[in-house]
């Protein structure tokens, strides 16, 4: 865990806890011992601390957070480093994050390679740096720069760290860091303790910062606590500031938001694991990808692979559609380049990997082909039957279907074992979630390849079984059905949406419907009006794209309540014989969010999702569920499953004749057990 080596008069201490040099109890103990021994060793004039492998240290071992404390704690170790009578130099490569950076802050000097990243991302777990980070960082870089790093959680590169005073010197490269650090250590005059510094700041910086970031930190406990802790660094000596920091840390750690965010952290890692997978399964090699359809989804899907350096053949049936689709891909890349996120060379490199064609047989040399046409089963089966005769043996055939049966699609081929679903979320080149749908006959290596290629293109993949809507869209159905029923019973679109945005969702059900397009799935017959959707679409109210949906929109797509929609709703109430009533926000929560939890429990019962936390990942990355609430299944446990069941039963008469409480949900509520299989 800790290795030491004496280079003449310089003691090198190496953190060696693969894969990320997490500061577990044994590492902390070994580091404290090495520092103490160095104080008593007359041969040692200076100390260098560095990390083995790819990085300095990614920080604390998060698995220890909910366990009894293991001595020594990290603040004690870092205080001992700073108290060293001999100069201590941190040699940073790769990343120094969280507790790893706090160790470096406790050192007297810091050297880093140009590509190194330094950051304090604790806020992303609902906590703050608890080992002196909120007190030492401002003393080195000033309060404003410290606030930017600590409240955002975003790391900075070593070059910027040098400019701010966080790093004292840049090394030439990772390969020479150890030698350069030892040489640099020999030039040091003595300790230079951060505790002795005062924080440079404008007294008004905290109010300005909070006001300027009000939208980002709204309703979040950790960023507010971070600001409070950094403020303490400007008025308190280091030891008292650390006491304040530790008190805030302990409060956050015990809070629901940190529990939720830590749940999401582990859930994302668990989602990568495939159940019932033979141990010797290996992914198939993917050197070229084919995409069928150059529309919005097809083009977005192609961009993921192009950006990862994987060649793409994109097929359309008409030259105009092909040109339009490839033009949109280029336009998207150029827009990113205009924001400074890509260079012109990178744009051209990505576009050079794209082969647009009208020749379906050009898919013959692809290792993975993704169908991205609109949701029509007959069309998809026709495409897969044709693809079956073109694709080479071993090619993986995937559908981007959002709702339809992958098993039925696979049955149109002679190789159902090679078929799976890859459900990208729109816009496909932006959204992180990818539902990887395992058909009843999907081969293990095909599923493994789907998960592997998803990670290669920067997605967060989640395995789903086959059912209508898979995980995310299936749970969306009861929410939308109940939201529309609530409109007829007396609620307004703005009330229902306000409840959801107040909960933390980026938009409510009707805002989302207007954004996606109300006409999706509409039968296109303006004379056939059987639902509220039919009535809206018949009047050309298709959502934002027609500046009219559940809301009216101006030229900047800003919504206002619509009197026309009010009239349509009132007409439907009259026809249905429904007398409007006052709808409480609490009833909206029960009928739109509790029903989602109930559907999620049914998804677990049916083995559509591997685990409850997978459902949370789907909703975090695909639908904007607020991370500080953990996900619908985690949130349900926090609310109390007994309360959810009782409230669903209380409203059962209004939830429709087909509504049933999930037996799994009822059983877990009765047993006081968390919601999982």
Image (cartoon, grey):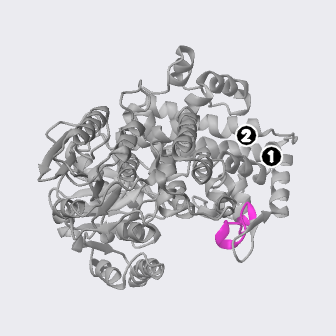
Q: Residue at x 60, y 63 (%)?
A: 201
Query: Can residue 548 be found in the magenta stretch?
Result: yes
Q: Residues within 10 Å of mark 1 (few under 14, many from 20)?
A: many
Q: Is residue 237 left or right of residue 83?
A: right
Tell me: residue 270, above or below residue 163: above
Depth check: give the residue in front, 431 or 127.
127
Q: CA distance from mark 1 to mark 2?
A: 9 Å
**Where is the C terminus found, in terms of image quarters?**
top left
Q: Which x, y percent locates residue 2?
A: 21, 40
Tell me: residue 69, above or below residue 242: above
- For label 1, the SS is loop
Which residues lie in the magenta part?
Answer: 538-551
Q: Which x, y percent locates residue 53?
A: 19, 52
The reply to whether the C-beta atoms of the residues labelled 1 and 2 are less than 8 Å apart is yes
Q: Is residue 272 visible?
A: yes
Q: Which residue is mark 2?
A: 588
**Where is the N terminus found, in terms of image quarters?**
top left
Q: Residue at x 62, y 63 (%)?
A: 515
Q: Which residue is mark 1?
A: 491
Depth check: give the residue in front, 352 or 378.
352
């Amino acid at each position: 865990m800790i290795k030491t080596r004496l280079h003449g008069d310089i003691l090198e201490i190496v953190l060696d806890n693969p894969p990320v040099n997490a500061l577990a109890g044994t590492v902390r103990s070994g580091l404290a011992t090495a520092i103490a021994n160095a104080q008593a060793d007359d041969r040692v004039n200076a100390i260098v601390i560095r990390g083995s492998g790819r990085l300095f240290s990614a920080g604390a071992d998060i698995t220890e957070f909910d366990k009894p404390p293991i001595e020594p704690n990290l603040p004690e170790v870092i205080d001992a480093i700073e108290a060293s009578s001999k100069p201590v130099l941190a040699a940073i490569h790769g990343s120094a994050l969280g507790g790893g950076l706090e160790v470096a802050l406790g050192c007297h000097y810091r050297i880093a390679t140009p590509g190194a990243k330094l950051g304090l991302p604790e806020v992303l777990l609902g906590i703050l740096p608890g080992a002196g980070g909120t007190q030492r960082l401002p003393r080195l870089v000033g309060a404003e720069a410290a606030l930017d790093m600590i409240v955002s959680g975003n790391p900075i590169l070593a070059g910027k760290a040098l400019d701010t005073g966080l790093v004292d010197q840049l090394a030439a490269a990772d390969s020479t860091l150890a030698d350069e650090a030892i040489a640099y250590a020999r030039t040091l005059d003595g300790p230079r303790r951060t505790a002795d510094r005062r924080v440079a700041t404008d007294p008004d910086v905290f109010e300005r910062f909070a006001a300027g970031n009000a939208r980002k930190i709204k309703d979040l406990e950790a960023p507010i606590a971070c600001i409070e802790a950094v403020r303490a660094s400007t008025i308190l000596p280091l030891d008292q500031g650390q006491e304040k920091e530790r008190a805030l840390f302990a409060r956050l750690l015990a809070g629901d938001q940190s529990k939720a965010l830590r749940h999401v952290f582990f859930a994302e890692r668990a989602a990568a694991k495939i159940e019932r997978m033979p141990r010797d399964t290996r992914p198939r090699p993917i050197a070229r990808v084919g995409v069928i359809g150059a529309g919005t989804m097809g083009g977005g899907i192609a961009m993921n692979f192009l950006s990862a350096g994987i060649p793409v053949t994109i097929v359309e049936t008409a030259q105009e559609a092909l040109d339009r689709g490839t033009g949109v891909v280029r336009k998207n890349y150029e827009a990113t380049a205009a924001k400074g996120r890509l260079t012109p060379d990178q744009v051209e490199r990505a576009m050079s990997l794209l082969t647009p064609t009208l020749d379906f047989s050009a898919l013959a040399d692809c290792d993975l082909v993704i169908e991205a046409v609109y949701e029509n089963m007959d069309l998809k089966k026709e495409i897969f039957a044709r693809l079956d005769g073109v694709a080479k043996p071993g090619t993986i055939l995937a559908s981007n279907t959002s709702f339809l049966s992958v098993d039925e699609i696979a049955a149109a081929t002679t190789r159902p074992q090679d078929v799976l679903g890859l459900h990208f979320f729109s816009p496909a080149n932006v959204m992180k979630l990818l539902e990887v749908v395992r058909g009843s006959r999907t081969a293990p290596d095909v599923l493994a390849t789907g998960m592997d290629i998803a990670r290669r293109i920067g997605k967060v993949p989640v395995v789903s079984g086959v059912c209508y809507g898979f995980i995310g869209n299936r749970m969306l159905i009861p929410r939308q059905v109940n939201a529309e029923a609530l409109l007829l019973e007396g609620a307004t679109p703005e009330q229902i949406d306000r409840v959801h945005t107040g909960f933390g969702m980026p938009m409510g059900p009707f805002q989302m419907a207007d954004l996606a397009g109300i006409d999706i799935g509409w039968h296109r017959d303006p004379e056939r009006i059987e639902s509220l959707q039919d009535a809206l679409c018949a009047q050309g109210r298709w959502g934002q794209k027609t500046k009219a949906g559940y809301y009216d929109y101006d030229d900047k797509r800003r919504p206002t309540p619509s009197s026309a929609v009010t009239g349509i709703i009132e007409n439907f109430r009259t026809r249905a014989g429904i007398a409007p009533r006052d709808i409480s926000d609490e009833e909206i929560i029960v009928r739109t969010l509790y029903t989602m939890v109930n559907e999620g429990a049914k998804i677990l019962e049916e083995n559509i999702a591997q685990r409850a936390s997978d459902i949370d990942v789907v909703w975090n990355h695909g639908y904007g569920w607020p991370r500080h609430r953990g996900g619908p299944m985690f949130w349900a446990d926090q609310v109390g499953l007994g309360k959810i069941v009782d409230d669903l039963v209380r409203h059962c008469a209004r939830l429709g004749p087909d509504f049933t409480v999930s037996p799994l949900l009822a059983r877990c509520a009765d047993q006081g057990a968390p919601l999982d299989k």
